[in-house]
């Protein structure tokens, strides 16, 4: 199973947990600087989870960071969306994902306060 997320702090936290659980992660962010910092941040979080001793470190999944949301949508089975709390931005992101996604793609969101 491959999961997808954005490259901010919440995305890195989810990615670290998923990687430490043995799942492959494909991450996207429109910001090059966020993509460049994501791997180090995510691996640090996965190491913190490992240090807790609750998961098996040998199970780590693979992390891939991409710059293209279209190829991302075709390569994952679950999207864990963590974009900023902005309705227009999220609608545009969902539309971009749905253009290239399979019919059975699951899209989950970390949205906590938007009124749609």
Image (tube, grey):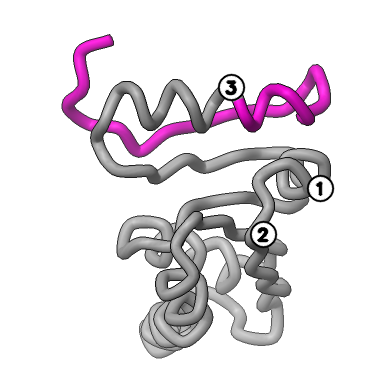
Residue designated by label 3:
95
Task: Using the image, determine if residue 73 lies above or below residue 38.
Answer: above
Residue designated by label 1:
75
Where is residue 3? Give x, y as percent: 65, 50
Quadrant position of the C terminus in the picture: top left
Where is residue 72? Give x, y as percent: 72, 48
Instruction: Tell me the element at label 3.
Output: helix
Q: Residue at x 51, y 32 (%)?
A: 93
Of pointers 1 and 2, the one earlier in the residue sequence: 2
Quarter of the view holding residue 61: bottom right
**Distance from Cα at disc 3 to Cα at disc 2:** 18 Å
**Distance from Cα at disc 1 to Cα at disc 2:** 8 Å
User: Over which residues does the magenta segment extend?
Assistant: 96-116
Of pointers 1 and 3, the one earlier in the residue sequence: 1
Q: Residue at x 65, y 31 (%)?
A: 97
Q: Viewer-proximal residue, 18 or 95? A: 95
Q: Residue at x 53, y 74 (%)?
A: 55
Residue designated by label 2:
26
Q: Disc 3 or disc 2, which is closer to the eye?
A: 3
Which numbered marker is on residue 87? none
**Distance from Cα at disc 1 to Cα at disc 3:** 16 Å
């Amino acid at each position: 199973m491959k999961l997808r997320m954005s490259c901010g702090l919440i995305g890195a936290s989810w990615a670290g947990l998923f990687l430490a659980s043995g799942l492959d992660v494909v991450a996207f962010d429109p910001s090059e600087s966020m993509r460049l910092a994501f791997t180090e941040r995510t691996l640090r979080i996965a190491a913190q989870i490992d240090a807790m001793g609750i998961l098996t470190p040998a199970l780590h999944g693979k992390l891939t960071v991409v710059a293209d949301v279209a190829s991302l949508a075709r390569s994952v089975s679950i999207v864990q969306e963590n974009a900023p709390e902005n309705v227009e931005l999220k609608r545009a992101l969902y539309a971009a994902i749905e253009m290239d996604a399979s019919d059975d793609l699951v899209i989950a969101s970390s949205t906590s306060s938007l009124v749609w």
